[in-house]
Image (cartoon, helix red, strand yellow):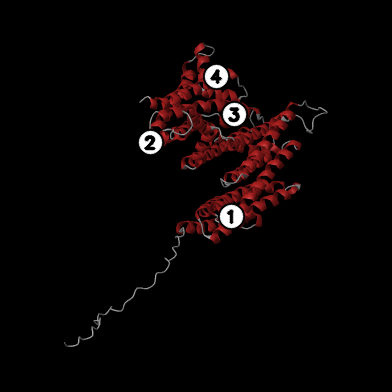
């Protein structure tokens, strides 16, 4: 038998015969694309800020400039807005740190200007420069804390904001008790700005932290203290030995401002610390306004409109060489504010229930441990609060009138008008909420609300044209329409019987809205 030949492996002569794959490696790092458009706008904004600042500073240097100071202020404001937009969308570490240190520097600059303002010659610096500087610094700090990933730096910014807010509130309340006109000019601005600072500190705390809860308790305690001081000092007779206030007539305007701001502090503290279903739903819907562009458009429109009305009011005041008290009636009473409010109310109420029905979240909401009454009241109170906030710019312009005019005027019609507006707006908001519950289309809900307000306004024109003074129909129309109530309250006359109809309208529409939601169970 012959021997077998050895078996040799076949030779592989192909081009890739000895190819071996490379060892596996970690995937490449993917970098997020930067906000190119925002950075371009930031460069434009920086140029506008520098250009506007030079134009405003040129008259102080006795230099001629092509751009007038008013246009320079406009350019600087527009540029600051572009920079703030970039601050909110930028997430790069270098930009975050740059904006963070800029915000801290602006806050500290405002503090320094307030300390310098104790000298009589530099008293106006804080109002003209310091307060706007601190407000812009707060907005920058909010943007930085929103995008910050390092917990330590974020905590430093929030602690600084919270501490400054608390100090501003305590300083304004203490100084307002001892100095006669302080709360009517700078004090109320400091109280509102301090509330924004403290509210930022509370709202930006982590859910696992109890610092926001403790800060809210402190804010409520300060509110209780201010409420007690405002009431007690207002009730003490003038020139009394027992009084601690070195001047008389504390209630107008200092006590009125102190009591009003203290009630606001207490209300905010209750909203944060109390977990009642109505409070939680109110907090949810009120926050939803600020997450929607509609709220900012409405608020911006109200600020611009209030500025226009204040400008014409000043022209009227200068043209006549003075007006008789109450001068506030010449500032607000006009058919134009009535029509503007008739557009704002549908814009604020059209999405309250119609959007919930359209998106299907209403069924999810009603499966929670809440009933229809809590849902309706929560949405109503949220829209009601936001509507009343729209009137804050009107009163801020009156503060500037008191500051620049250097003369006192009657503040009491503001109190009576605010009380009347509380009842009138409650009726409007409840009607808008009811119209929103009838359909899942926001536009239809807004049209229904607007038609209802037009019908309400038509009552005033009918009474003004056809009613006979002193007749029964005139009295009925006076009780029903809201324009006459505006006029009477701004004259300082406010009878509780004029508020009964508007309170009844509020209760009726809220009851009807609850029944509309309950009817879903019957279908």
Of labels 3 and 2, earlier in sequence is: 2
Please give left or right for residue 484 compared with residue 321 in the image: left
Q: Earlier in the sequence, mark 4 or mark 3?
A: 3
The residue tagged with tag 2: helix, strand or loop? Answer: helix
Nearer the N terminus, badge 4 or badge 2? 2
Q: Earlier in the sequence, mark 3 or mark 1?
A: 1
User: Mark 4 and mark 1: span between their CA atoms?
Assistant: 53 Å
Q: Residue at x 68, y 40 (%)?
A: 187
Which-is-in-front pick, marks 4 and 3? 4
Q: Are marks 4 and 1 in contact (CB under 8 Å)?
A: no
In three-dimensional space, the C-alpha distance between marks 3 and 1, rounded to whole angstroms, equals 43 Å
When the figure is inspected, residue 341 is found, relative to residue 68, above or below; the finding is above
Tag 4 residue: 500
**In this rendering, which labeled residue sits more in front, label 4 or label 1?**
1
Callout 4: helix, strand or loop?
A: helix
Q: Are marks 2 and 1 in contact (CB under 8 Å)?
A: no
Question: Badge 4 local density, few (<14 within 10 Å), some, or many (20+)?
Answer: some
The residue shown at (73%, 32%) is 229
- Distance between the alpha carbons at the discs numbered 4 and 3: 16 Å
Q: CA distance from mark 2 to mark 1?
A: 39 Å
**Farthest residue, direction top:** 471
Helix, strand, or loop for circle 1? helix
Using the rendered image of the protein, determine whether residue 318 is visible from the camera's viewpoint.
no
Rendered location of residue 147, percent (x, y): 53, 53
Query: Which residue is label 2 attached to?
Result: 358
Mark 2 or mark 1: whose residue is earlier in sequence:
1
Which residue in the protein does label 3 denote?
418
Q: Callout 3: 10 Å neighbours few (<14), some, many (20+)?
A: some
Residue 189 in percent (x, y) is at 65, 41
Foreground: disc 4 or disc 2: 2
Say which residue label 1 marks: 151
């Amino acid at each position: 038998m012959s021997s077998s030949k050895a078996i040799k492996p076949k030779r592989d002569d192909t081009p890739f015969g000895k190819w071996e794959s490379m060892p596996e490696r970690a995937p490449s790092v993917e970098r997020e694309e930067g906000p190119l458009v925002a950075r371009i706008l930031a460069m434009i904004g920086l140029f506008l800020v520098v250009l506007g600042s030079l134009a405003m500073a040129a008259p102080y240097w006795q230099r001629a400039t092509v751009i007038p100071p008013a246009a320079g202020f406009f350019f600087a404001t527009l540029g600051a807005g572009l920079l703030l937009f970039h601050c909110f969308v930028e997430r790069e570490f270098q930009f975050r740190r740059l904006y963070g240190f800029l915000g801290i520097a602006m806050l500290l600059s405002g503090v320094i200007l307030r300390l310098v303002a104790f000298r009589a010659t530099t008293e106006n610096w804080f109002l003209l420069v310091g307060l706007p500087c601190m407000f812009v610094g707060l907005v920058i700090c909010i943007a930085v804390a929103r995008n910050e990933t390092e917990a330590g730096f974020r905590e430093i910014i929030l602690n600084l904001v919270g501490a400054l807010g608390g100090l501003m509130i305590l300083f304004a309340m203490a100084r307002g008790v001892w100095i006669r006109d302080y709360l009517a000019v700078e004090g109320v601005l400091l109280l509102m700005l301090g509330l924004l600072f403290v509210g930022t500190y509370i709202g930006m705390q982590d859910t696992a932290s109890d610092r926001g809860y403790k800060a809210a308790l402190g804010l409520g305690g300060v509110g209780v203290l201010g409420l007690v001081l405002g009431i007690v000092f207002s009730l003490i007779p003038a020139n009394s030995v027992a009084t601690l206030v070195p001047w008389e007539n504390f209630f107008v305007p200092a006590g009125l401002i102190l009591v009003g701001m203290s009630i606001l502090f207490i209300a905010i503290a209750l909203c944060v610390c109390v977990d009642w279903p109505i409070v939680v739903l109110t907090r949810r819907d009120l926050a939803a306004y600020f997450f929607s562009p509609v709220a900012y458009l409405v608020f911006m429109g109200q600020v611009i409109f209030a500025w226009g009305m204040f400008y014409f009011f000043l022209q009227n005041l200068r043209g006549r060489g003075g007006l008789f008290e109450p001068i506030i009636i010449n500032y607000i009473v006009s058919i134009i504010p009535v029509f503007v409010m008739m557009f704002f109310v549908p814009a604020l109420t059209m999405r309250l229930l119609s959007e919930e029905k359209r998106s299907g979240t209403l069924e999810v909401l009603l499966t929670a441990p809440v009933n229809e009454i809590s849902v309706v009241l929560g949405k109503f109170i949220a829209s009601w609060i936001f509507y009343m906030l729209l009137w804050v710019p009107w009163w801020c312009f009156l503060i500037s009138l008191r500051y620049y005019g250097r003369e006192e005027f009657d503040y009491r019609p503001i109190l009576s008008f605010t009380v009347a507006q509380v009842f009138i707006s409650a009726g409007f908001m409840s009607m808008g909420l009811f119209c929103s519950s009838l359909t899942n289309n926001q536009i239809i809900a807004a049209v229904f609300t607007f038609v209802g307000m037009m019908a309400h306004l038509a009552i005033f024109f009918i009474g003004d044209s056809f009613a006979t003074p002193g007749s029964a129909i005139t009295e009925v129309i006076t009780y029903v329409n809201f324009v006459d109530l505006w006029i009477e309250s701004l004259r300082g006359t406010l009878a509780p019987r004029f508020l009964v109809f508007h309170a009844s309208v509020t209760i009726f529409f809220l009851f009807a809205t609850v029944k509309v939601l309950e009817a879903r169970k019957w279908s």
